[in-house]
Image (cartoon, rainbow, N blue to C red):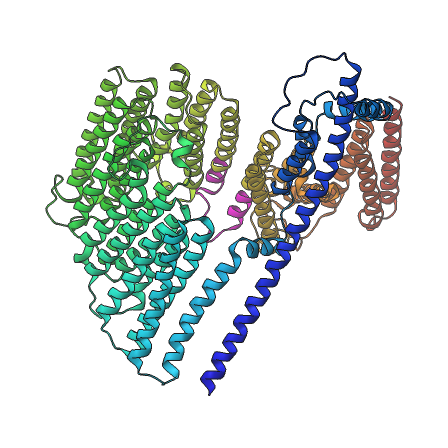
Amino acid sequence: MDSLLTFFGLAVMAFLFGGAGLAWYSFSQLKQANRRIDALNQAVTDLKQLLAKSDATQQNAASAPLQPVDEAPASGSPVESALELATESELRPPKEGRDSLACKAPNAVVPVQVATHSSSDQRASDAANTSEKKDRRAVNNKDKPPHPAPSHTPRPSLTERFEAFIANNGLLWIGGAILALGGVFLAKYSVEAGLVSIATRLVFGGVFAAALVLLAEYLYRKQGGQSGVLTTCAALASGGVITGFALVLVTFTYYQFISSALAFAGLAFISLLATALALRYGPLLAVIGIIGAYAVPALVNTDSNNLFALLMYVNLVSCAAMWVAQKVQKDWLWWQSFTGHFLWLAVSIAVGESGDIWLIFATMVVGLYLYIVAGVLGWRFSESNGQALAVKVLLMPRKEQLAIILSVMGLVAFYALHGFAPSLIWVCALLAVLCAWLPLRHSAFDAWPFVALAFCGYVIMMYPLPASGATLSVFAGAFGFTQFAAWLCFGYGWFMMKRYPKRLSYCLFSAVSSLCVFGLSYVISPLAISAQLYPLWSGHLLVMAAAAIWLGQQGLSAYGKAALWVLANTHLALVLSMWLNASTLTLALCGQLVLLAYYQKSYQLAFPSWLTKIGLSLVLLRVTLAPFTPEYSQENVLSVHWSLVVLPLMLAFIFAAYRLQTNRALKNWLEGALMHLLALFVTLETSYYLIGDYPSLQHLSFKEMAALSMNWLVLGTVYWWRYRISQRDLYLIAGSFLAGASGILHVAILWQYNPWFSAIDVGPYLLFNWVSVLWLVPLVMLSVALKYGLIPARLQLDIRFIYGLIALFCFLFVNATVRTVFQQQFIMVQLTTSQAELYTYSAVWLLIAASLVVLGQRLAQSPLYQSGFAILLVVILKAFLVDMAHLDGLYRAISFIGLGLSLVGLGWLFTRVRSH
């Protein structure tokens, strides 16, 4: 009884949904009928206009002399023509509307015979006066061009789109979905009813699923594949496929009537059948089939752990899916199959053993062939293209890059899980052959050799190095692989550059490939074997440099010659970095910028600007971080500390590149680099010679914090100056960060190492001490930044805040300087203050106040003028309340007289300045 009620409820729901759908369908049909009625009304209006034109034509013909008239045209009378036009307007799509009729109505007028009856002449004579104005108005309207239709149509609302869906085969899809639900509920009913045997129920479900598919095929064959019938067939077939899929899963998981192998085969067959039916009924079935086919291994667990069977099945499904995707020409089917293939590939990498590498690698190759190579070269490799592609096209995200990157990442993950194995060398070799051969057929693969180069570097890093104390063979193991790979890269780059001179990616590959291989081996090799390894590496590099110079004279293009010259220079720089210290590598890299600018100017080449920008940024980053690198701390060049030699030479190199460069944007970059290096040189040398070493960021002392605060403020001001010239946000961010870090250090100094309250030695020399570093330099830098407008307006800093900082630094510096005159190295307030020191404070601030007043008068700057008088007032109050508080008798009188004469003299001076 409950099952009958359930079935009755489902039937009621089906009727409700069907009724709602029919209501929407009827509503949409009613709207179409209204549009057709509007079209007919417009046709009637146009018919009246045609009749008026016919009367005017007859009137003109009656006024002309009578001539013999040929037989009337076959088109008939104007009335018949108008009726034909009205019929066409009824059948025409409603959106053409009035404009289409207005354009075609005048052309529908046919020649009219001249009537000989007096009634026609009388009617033409009577209508002549009344229709003359209408005819002129109609002719004028005809000559005017129609108003252009708006180019942008409003996007339909959700309700309108739903109406369109219902009107355009929406009911068919709803019906297909209800059929699928019916199949699922039929399977459920077969489980719960118990009226017949389980096997009979399942057979009924299978018959129902097969009936839906057969019905779809019957309709397709009977109607001849019309568009409306295709939608109906797709809905029926999708319902049958989903029903069959559900029945096989129920049979296996719930009843366990069939084995896992049979369930696997059944589900795979249904999925592939749905994929094949997509060629007849549309791509919807392909979606169902591909998802189902890739989901089968996850739904059915055979407990066999057979990775070979799994990957072969995945490859079979991928082949079928890509064949269907190519037939139906749907890009989203490609992405669906691509995702399923590489997801199962990732699962196989995670669960596979080290001996399964060849299965995994073969699956990767199949994926590359199906998803990339077949789409570019064709299934039989019949397509080819040797034309050069732009660098931006090669670097932009594309499907070719995604597939090869995922494949290489999978190989890296596999060997990261299982460690180094000899198979890694063969996998690298096969991948290199693939990445080297494909660019010979098509230029779309020009970026793949760089991927093979990156994987070659991974192999070098994974290769085990000889243990300490073991016999070293520089021609075997990792070192033998390095030499072989470097010479192969050198030869391949030269061959491709010679064969395809316009494909500039190989110029770049030739310039960097062998250098990257030897450079990586040089970096990861332990210092213990440097005595044996470096001479051999230097020999290879020098031979390659000589070969590059010789090959550059063999008729290559200008870009090829420049690439080989860069190769020779970079190899020489690596040799120098092996035998010299670490700082010379930075110097050698900086020299490449000069050579690049020289080649660009000498050979009239247009190198990509980003190449110079990246190289310049790397050099600046390296030299900026060098002071905080342990290997640079005690390094000397020519018996002198490295920064005193390397930084001036880098300044000279970049200045030479600036003079050779013709690109204005790159000249701005080089200007910024010059200012950065100059500021870095000043700050590093001051820090080194003030402290005796570069500061350690982990444990900062008072002197280190003072030096860093000064240096960072100077660098921040330089970056603000660069921002004002180039308007690049990077300079604004860097300058603001450094200035903020300097401010934080100042606050930390006043909190932790405040020399006014702690026994901090500020130095014995006047002006050349830590007081100047701590407060004079920030005072000068902020004043310069304020004077020349270097502080960015985007920071929205209040000018009063900047004036307050300047006044604070000035107050601290002046008082600390006076304090050091009397107290030597310490300026603590706890120390005894003499009467002479008090008078000195007043005298110095009196001079400062007078200077500010005079300067404010001369420059017409009200803040300076007002600040001077404020300081003068404070000085007078201090003189009365502090300085003269301990004087009596003659000394007090003389002090007052001296103070009064000073003020009178200052007043006279201000008057003279104002008068001038």
Total residue callouts: 0
Describe residue 106's horizontal placement relative to residue 506 as left or right.
Answer: right
Q: Where residue 581 appears, x then y in whole percent?
A: 31, 35
Location of residue 823 with respect to 4 vertically, above or below: above
Q: Nearer the viewer, residue 415 or 350?
A: 350
Instruction: Identify the residue shown where x is 36% and y is 85%.
Output: 195
Location of residue 796 with respect to 124 vertically, above or below: below
Instruction: Identify the residue shown where x is 40% and y is 79%.
Output: 189
Instruction: Identify the residue shown where x is 18% and y is 38%.
Output: 533
Please check the rendered image and state whether residue 665 is part of the magenta-colored stretch, yes or no.
no
Q: Where residue 149 appears, x then y in whole percent?
A: 67, 34
Please check the rendered image and state whether residue 703 is part of the magenta-colored stretch, yes or no.
yes
Instruction: Identify the residue shown where x is 21% and y is 66%.
Output: 305
Residue 500 in view of the camera: yes
In terms of secondary structure, what is the magenta stretch mainly? helix
Q: Residue furthest bottom?
A: 1
Q: Where residue 504 appears, x then y in whole percent?
A: 34, 26
Q: Nearer the viewer, residue 388 or 532?
A: 388
Describe residue 663's horizontal placement relative to residue 889 as left or right.
Answer: left
Describe residue 851's horizontal placement relative to residue 329 as left or right.
Answer: right
Location of residue 827 with respect to 69 vertically, above or below: below
Residue 413 sits in quarter: bottom left
- What's the magenta region? 685-710
Residue 67 sits in quarter: top right
Residue 613 sits in quarter: top left
